[in-house]
Image (spheres, rainbow, N blue to C red):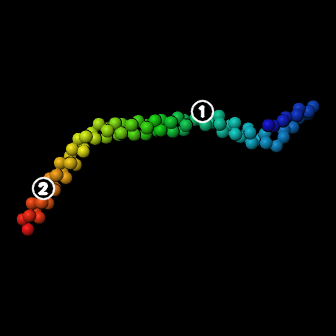
Amino acid sequence: MSLVIMSRFRATTFRGEANMVKLVGAAKEFAAGEEGASIVEYSLLVALLAAASIAVLYGFGNEIQYIFTASNTSLGTASDAITSAS
């Protein structure tokens, strides 16, 4: 907390007030700027992409599992054929 004592001739400020003025100025500049808005927009975009990726993978999960199962079965059959031929 800073105190200002008004004398007859000039205002006297105590230590810490200059730092507080700088802090308030920086906060006002940040609020007026668009950097904060950009960060929020990019965060929302990343969250949306993550949700979409999860939804797509969840939706295609059974089909992907079927492809891997079919590939594994085919490779197993081919491996058995090669082993028995040699």
Does the rendering let one see residue 54?
A: yes
In the image: residue 68, left or right of residue 55: left
Query: Residue 74 placed where, x, y %?
Result: 14, 53
Query: Residue 86 placed where, x, y %?
Result: 8, 68
Does the rendering let one see residue 49?
A: no
Residue drawn at point x = 47 percent, y = 38 percent: 43
In-front residue for pair 84/4: 84
Q: Which mark is residue 22?
A: none
Residue drawn at point x = 84 percent, y = 40 percent: 14
In-front residue for pair 53/14: 53
Identity of the residue furthest to the right in this view: 8
Q: Earlier in the sequence, mark 2 or mark 1?
A: 1
Q: For the residue labelled by badge 2, is the local secondary structure a helix, a strand or a loop?
A: helix
Residue drawn at point x = 82 percent, y = 43 percent: 15
- Residue linked to disc 1: 32
Query: Residue 76 placed where, x, y %?
Result: 16, 56
- Residue linked to disc 2: 77
- The 10 Å Cα crowd at callout 2, few under 14, some 14 to 19, many 20 or more, is few
User: Mark 2–mark 1 contact, CB under 8 Å?
Assistant: no
Q: For the residue labelled by badge 1, is the local secondary structure a helix, a strand or a loop?
A: helix
Figure check: 32 above or below 80: above
- Examine the image and state in which quarter residue 33 appears: top right
Residue drawn at point x = 35 percent, y = 40 percent: 53
Quarter of the image for the N terminus: give it.
top right
**Which residue type does callout 1 highlight?**
Ala
- Examine the image and state in which quarter residue 16 appears: top right
Comparing labels 2 and 1, the label whose residue is closer to the camera: 2
- The 10 Å Cα crowd at callout 1, few under 14, some 14 to 19, many 20 or more, is few
In the image: residue 54, left or right of residue 17: left
Query: Residue 85 placed where, x, y %?
Result: 6, 65
Identity of the residue furthest to the left in this view: 85
**Which residue type does callout 2 highlight?**
Thr
